[in-house]
Image: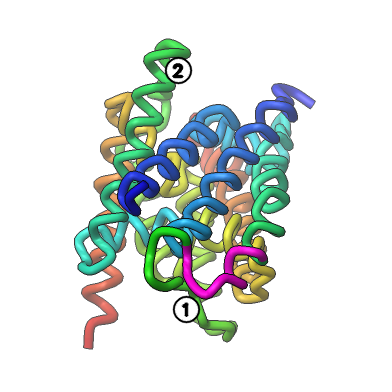
Amino acid sequence: MHNFTPVSALIGGALIGLASAWLLAANGRIAGVSTIVHGIFSPPEAQWRAWFVSGLLLAGLAWIGFAGPVPVRTSLSVGWVAAGGLLVGFGTRMGGGCTSGHGVCGLGRLSVRSLVAVITFMATGMISAFVVRHVLGVPS
Amino acid sequence: MSALLSAIAAGFVFGLGLWISGMANPAKVIGFLDITGEWDASLALVMAGAVGVVLIPFRLAVKRAKPLLEEAFALPTRKDIDAPLVAGSALFGVGWGIVGYCPGPGITALATLSTESVVFVAAMMVGGLAHRALTKT
């Protein structure tokens, strides 16, 4: 397999799990990023959500600061990026979660509802990636 | 430690995990989702690693009367499998497969100030607001 990076994937995944476990144990909240982001202006949960999102942004700044500039993809047109973003925003609100809320936290809580969500978005994600790259011929 | 410092620390560690794992690199995510290309299975290990880490702490945490820094847990209670769950997750997957960003990576990638991260997050917010407008009765 090309570009297979199992060690960094496991370490990164473990950090995501650690942060999610901490947020539940300390704050009593689920680290579901779509719910956090879309509820960032909804009191009384708005404040901690804004701080969590600030942490995500700081991590990006710290990563770029220490690891150097990251490769930025420019091949995907703005129209496709916007279409993808709209579907991600609408779909995660309709389905009540994303890769973190349903994926990490939901599976971690052995939720069948989340398992159904994960199987669904993994399946359509794979179909979509295939159709967009190989049927429609969009450069990735 | 205050609950807000705890939240920002959790966001920071979560974000570092996204960068280290490769989730914040949309080209790598597409390499995982596109199983007919040169398939890169790495990102399956991100979810496996994360779920593996949370399994036991989650069970122990919710046995306590309340979390360490707040007065009460706020946990999802729904267990039903309904049409919006499946349809919404399906739409999310389609968007994820197009762009290679899911919400967390999109947000932390804003630190690059790349055009695509800004466009993605703006469109994602609009998509969420559209759902709210359509479901408001």
Residue on which disc 1 sits: B84
At 38% from the left and 70% from the top, the residue drawn is B71
The one of B41 and B17 positioned closer to us in this rendering = B17
The one of A133 and A105 positioned closer to us in this rendering = A105
Label 2 sits on a secondary structure element that is loop
Q: Residues within 10 Å of mark 2 (few under 14, many from 20)?
A: few
Image-based side of B111 in relation to A18, left or right:
left
Where is the C terminus of chain B found, in terms of image quarters?
bottom left
Give the image location of residue B29, x and y in percent. 57, 37
Image-based side of A48 in relation to A119, left or right:
left
The type of residue carrying mark 2 is Pro
Separation of marks 1 and 2 at Cα, in angstroms: 36 Å
Residue on which disc 2 sits: A71
Residue B62 among magenta residues: yes
Please tell me whether residue B98 is drawn above or below residue A94 in the rendered image.
above
Image: magenta residue range: B60-67
The type of residue carrying mark 1 is Pro
Give the image location of residue B99, x and y in percent. 45, 41
At 34% from the left and 24% from the top, the residue drawn is A61
Label 1 sits on a secondary structure element that is helix
Give the image location of residue B63, x and y in percent. 62, 72
Please tell me whether residue B137 is drawn above or below residue A133 in the rendered image.
below
Please give the chain letter of the residue carrying mark 2.
Answer: A
